[in-house]
Image (spheres, helix red, strand yellow):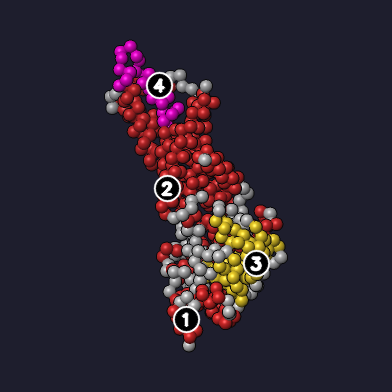
Amino acid sequence: MYFKRQLESLGRYMVLLGRTFRKPENLRMYYQAFMRDLDLLGYNSLAIVSVISIFVGAVVTIQTAFNLDDPFIPQYYIAIATRESIILEFSPTMVSLILAGKVGSNIASTLGSMRVSEQIDALEVMGVNPAAYLIAPKVVSMVIFNPILITISMFLGLVGGYLASVGGVMGVDDYIYGLQLDFDAYHITYALIKSFVFGFLIVSISAYFGFYVKGGAIEVGINATKAVVASSVAVIVSNYFLTQILLV
Amino acid sequence: MIEVNGLKKGFGDRVILKGIDADFHKGRTNLIIGQSGGGKTVFLKSLVGLHDIDEGEISYDGVALGSLNRKERKDLRTRMGMVFQGNALFDSLTIEENVTFALNMFSDMSESEKRDRANFCLERVNLKNVNQQYPAELSGGMQKRVAIARAISMNPQYLFCDEPNSGLDPKTAVVIDKLLSELTEEFNMTTVINTHDMNSVIEIGDNIIFIKDGFKAWQGSGEEILSTDNEDIKDFIYSSEIFRRIRNK
């Protein structure tokens, strides 16, 4: 029974995606919605992503330095470890998880409120495809802006590590040298591919939970929580498979 | 004209509409009445295609809704207007943006033409100087008028209203009723109103369909309803003390 329900949900999710990516009724209106969502979901996430990245970058450097406190291990190894942790995992995955909470709950509760107040029905009766008008601009804006956010996060994470080295946890020159040593640009590509996929999953899954809300305010809250949980799980699981495919 | 034949609709094991035949006439105010929970909203939402029906046929001016492809159904919907029970105004948009929403989406009008159309629709429902306000800044009655203005903005052939008087005081309810009746005549629309308000039934009911237990129990005009022998209708109308007193006098 549980398995059947999950299968039904997956089917409804696919149907919703099919409805989302249909020809827009009016490109100008969709562009306006896209710009609004870019600001709401992307630009408005910049501050939290920046603060978290700087501090986590600094903490990762300090913790690595603490664990590699050995006279036989060169200090620049600390910078290499920090760089790899930030680029490969922290920025693309952990920041996406944070965004799953911030953006996912926003999308699910907005669409859920529109559903229970019949605004989605009103769009439908007008002849507008509500899935396309309400969800497609969000998906596109997040798929475009998530890689930008992740790139900024990587940079600021490494800046955080630099600040920690300035604070005396390791030599600044060793940190700069370590950041550049054996750098593989493919790791950036790998991180950006992940952030692209995660952006899509976070928005589409959250939109699914918001779009199909039934009931009232309590159900909107419940579905917003479900959206965050489901999109976080999707990010973590897909992270494994993407890593398996792209790195191994 | 909208014709309904053998309409059945249920949710899971619960059958709400058990085979309804009805017709809604052009240029007239058609009412669907019945007790709360009797399936009026399900009926109305089935009519506009918000609910997929289980059995039966709904046709708009001879064209069956079920036979339309996605594009044709979309085209039909641009000829519909609907006023929802809770108004369903887009709360992040101004009143003017609400009224011009469908025009922005589907028409080739210039900005000034759209503004003129919005002003015309708002003035037609007796609203002025509210263009830049947001729905939350207006009273319930004013929001209802905005919802009507939005519904008529595209010059619809069919207007659907779900409980347009719910939550309004009796005086405002009468104003809304008269407005809907006038607009129906003025724009020669097929108007279908879902209500359980007996004032509406007597004031504006040209063609009334009474739903009970998922079936059409009666159909007639506002004048006929007061003199009918149908026991179900009598039960429904004279359930209130005021109407019982009027009848006894």
Decide if residue B30 is in sight here. no
Q: Residues within 10 Å of mark 3 (few under 14, many from 20)?
A: some
Say yes or no: labels 2 and 3 on the same chain.
Answer: no
Amino acid on which disc 1 is placed: Arg
Can you give x and y, in whole percent of width and height, for residue B205 in the image?
A: 57, 76
B11 relative position to A71: left or right: right
The answer for how far apart the CA atoms under marks 3 and 4 are is 76 Å
Element type at mark 2: helix
- For residue B21, which numbered disc appears in the image? 3
Q: Residues within 10 Å of mark 4 (few under 14, many from 20)?
A: many
At x 57%, y 82%, the residue is B227
Amino acid on which disc 2 is placed: Ile
Along the line of sight, the residue nearer the viewer: B107 or A21: A21
Residue at image mark 2: A222
Amino acid on which disc 4 is placed: Ile
Start-end of magenta stretch: A66-91
Check if mark 4's residue and mark 1's residue have beta carbons within 8 Å: no
Say yes or no: labels 2 and 4 on the same chain.
Answer: yes
The quadrant where residue A99 appears: top left
Element type at mark 1: helix
Q: Residue furthest bottom?
A: B249
Residue A83 magenta-drawn? Answer: yes
Element type at mark 3: strand
Q: Residue furthest top?
A: A72
Can you give x and y, in whole percent of width and height, for residue A192 in the image?
A: 50, 32
Q: Main secondary structure of the magenta part?
A: helix
Check if mark 3's residue and mark 4's residue have beta carbons within 8 Å: no
Residue at image mark 4: A80
Between circles 2 and 4, the one closer to the viewer is 2
Q: What quarter of the picture does the N terminus of chain B occupy?
A: bottom right
Residue at image mark 1: B244
